[in-house]
Amino acid sequence: ADNVKNALRKVAHRLQAVGVFSKLDREQALKETPPDRLKRFPRALPHAAVWLKQLNPHKVRIDTSLDRAIQIKAEKIMQSYHKQLKTLGIHNGSAVVIDQRTGQIRALVGNFDFFDRDHHGQVAGFLGMRSPGSALKPFLFALSIDRGFMLPSYLLQDVAVCYASYEPQNYDGQFRGLVRADEALVMSLNVPAVNQLNRIGMDPFLGFLETAGLSGLHRKDRLGLSAAIGGLEANLLELTNLYTILARGGSVLAWSVKPTENPPDWRPLRLISSGAAYLTRQALGSRDRPDFPHRRDIARTLPRVFWKTGTSYGHKDAWAIGADTEHTVGIWLGNFDATPSVHLVGAERAGPLMFDILESTSNPKNRPDHREPLPDDLIEVEVCALSGRLPTKYCPDRRLQAAPVRNLPTESCSMHIELEVDTATGFALCPLCRKHRNYVRRSFIRLPTAVQRWIKDENLLGRSAPGHLPTCRYVTNQGKLQITQPQDNTTVILVDNLDPAQQEIPLEVNASQHHGEVFWYINGRLLQRAAPNQRVWFKPEIGEFEISVLDDTGRGDRIRIRIQTL
């Protein structure tokens, strides 16, 4: 007991000497009765403590915005998943909780076990730069709306596409032909996201991410369209804070671990309109929970949650980020040595963990109605129920869609058309070839040629427009052939040690008005005759090539490409 009292006296004097204790604090400490047995030293938030000490090397006492109750709950929930995840080859994980109203961090869990030396347990996972997978797609969605490029109701093309030598693929390896923009986001389809980035432009998108606080963009000149699906780096802390922009209605706040809030007159920077943020939240909030329907009854009593997951290429990272009315929670799972696991899938592994932590932070007194009112910068407009574009007189069904007032898309529906159809042959007629023929006027759906081979909906295919009467002398006036893949003046790079047969180049033509065959030529030599909606493959060789396509009426198009190795 005497040894304990002597140690207590030394510690109290030391704390007064460095300014932590006042003289009164020291005297009070010396009056305390020493414990009769050893107590476990506090080991809460070890990763955060180490990180904060690195940020404040000269401070003895560090005050933070971390919430003790939320931190303890987050740590316990992470530990409860640890045993199961270890059996699946997943040894590292991290969690971040941010109060989106202030930008203050409420919890930081750096890893499952600080003392797990075999799996780098002392590394703070919330700082590690990793591929975010699909976690950036919601921001392409919001930016596309803000620029007037689309609405959530738009039918987007989900077909094989080639940008120079880059051919994005969906996670399941399938293409759907046409898919609504909001459904493409919920299903996390890669091709529509890459197409959105291509239209927005790399510089505007990367500029948005940089302004929003992502620090892993120092090699911007080397980033390409794969950035839409994880081809850059971000850490969990920055990525979670990025999602607070959507929760906050489009404004960015820098994350903070300081206990004081921003001054009352301080205004956050707006990066996304409140309307685009709202429409993005609505899309992400429509997705079923990963544990649905097992916790369906519980979900009905909670605030509405919007959430998104991400899985990096090769199954090395699994992400889940979600928000309710108060907090935004981010989860990362993986292995610090980059060991992959087929179980590292965002929705399956990180999603349930994120929901458990988000529920633990939810305030029972703050559970508003799930119906969120429209922001002032949105109005409801009438759109075609099929294409999602502004309707024409040929669109049989319409619906209401919320749209931004300032950037209302002006694109009209081009899928519904009315044609004069020859009753004998079923072909479409024009005023120049319908003479002496019996015909009727009928409504059809005109599908883009690029999507026809991918459409599975028999109802759509059955209502698609027929080809023009092939014997019509003026059929050449119905449109022209145009090569859509590859693009003119493209340079294709071949991999040296890979068989050219495995690097074949797809050839496609836009021939939506054509009925019959087309003929493909390479440097004037016939390659193949095919249906206009059929993809043709060209086995590459080193050199320059002229690719041309013709139909039996003489219509055609030609492009030039260059094929080389690195």
Image: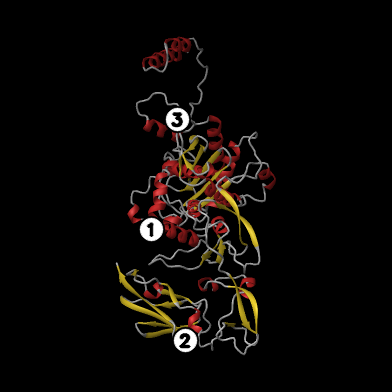
Q: Amino acid at mark 2?
A: Thr
Disc 3, SS: loop
Q: Nearer the viewer, mark 1 or mark 2?
A: 2
Left or right position of 315 against 288: left
The percent coordinates of residue 523 (x first, y second) are 34, 82
Task: Choose between 168 and 56: the one closer to the eye.
Answer: 168
The percent coordinates of residue 353 (x first, y second) are 56, 44
Q: Amino acid at mark 3?
A: Lys
Residue 258: image tag: 3
Bin the neighbour count of mark 3 within 10 Å (Cα to Cα): few under 14, some 14-19, many 20 and up. Answer: some
**Nearer-N-terminus badge (2/3):** 3
CB under 8 Å between discs 1 and 2: no
Disc 2, SS: loop
Task: Choose between 200 and 508: the one closer to the eye.
Answer: 200
Which residue is identified by label 1? 224
CB under 8 Å between discs 1 and 3: no
Q: Is residue 163 above or below residue 317?
A: below
Label 1, label 2: how far apart the Cα atoms are: 40 Å
**Nearer-N-terminus badge (1/3):** 1
Q: Name the residue at 45% across, 15% down.
A: 4
**Nearer-N-terminus badge (1/2):** 1
Q: Which corner quadrant holds the C terminus? A: bottom left
Task: Choose between 413 and 223: the one closer to the eye.
Answer: 413
Which residue is identified by label 2? 553
Q: Name the residue at 39% across, 46% down.
A: 210
Label 2, label 3: how far apart the Cα atoms are: 73 Å
Label 1, label 3: how far apart the Cα atoms are: 36 Å
